[in-house]
Amino acid sequence: PGKPAPDSTRRSEKSRRAIYDAALALVVEAGYPKTTIEGIAARAGVGKQTIYRWWSSKADVLMEAFLDLAEQAVPDTGPEPYVFPDTGDLAADVKAVLRATVDQMRDPRFDVPSRALAAEGVVNEQLGRELVAKLMQPSLDLYVARLRAAQEAGQVRPEIDPRIALEFFISPLAQRWLQHTGPISYEYTDTLVDYALHGLAPR
């Protein structure tokens, strides 16, 4: 009696993976507006009802496919993708996280579909909000928590708003990546951290 369960689990895991791959591929090839649940189902070789059993919309499918992709793209972070190191050295910790982000941005598996979804998020406000809430917020929360810990340790001024401060690290990188305004590299993100933490004016 215990035998069918692993088989169905394995089968549903295989279907889930096929659906993720199909959704990401279609967004790249056809763009977000032309990607449909029907198209994803046909590409994945599953019934439409299988997708509707697990997700309520194509946006939900894509969000989950992206979370899965993010976990695969940076395997060094281990089983928990949302971990922010706290070695006591704020600069080193932020640099490490930004370097992992650069690795992800340079991975074509992540880069190409991300751009398609990000572009649609700019013109489709509802999708843009969902992207922030589901994909970005968990990582923003970790930056906030790490900066608060640095405030408690006396490494960041107590009046600083961590939610604004984190933008010094991630917004310039996002701008470069999205608009190709310059190369993205470890040197670039390390420099962002140094500028943000030490300021620009002479002391």
Image (tube, rainbow, N blue to C red):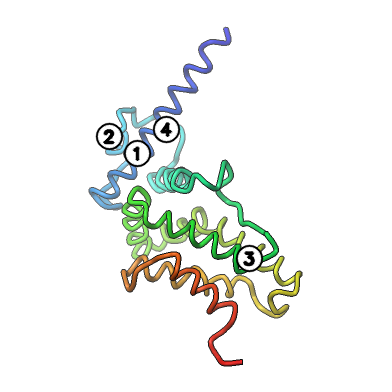
| Mark 1 to mark 3 CA distance (whole Å) | 32 Å
Q: Secondary structure at mark 4?
A: helix
Q: Nearer the viewer, mark 2 or mark 3?
A: 3
Do the residues bearing badges 4 and 1 touch, measured as CB atoms within 8 Å? Answer: no
Residue placed under numbered mark 1 in the picture? 21
Query: On screen, 163 above or below 81?
Result: below
Residue type at mark 2 is Arg
Q: Nearer the viewer, mark 4 or mark 3?
A: 3
State the residue at coordinates (57%, 55%). 138
Query: On screen, 174 above or below 9?
Result: below
Percent x, y of residue 109: 35, 48
Q: Is residue 139 left or right of residue 189?
A: right
| Mark 4 to mark 2 CA distance (whole Å) | 12 Å
Q: How many marks?
A: 4
State the residue at coordinates (68%, 76%). 156
| Mark 2 to mark 1 CA distance (whole Å) | 9 Å
Residue placed under numbered mark 2 in the picture? 43
Q: Secondary structure at mark 2?
A: helix
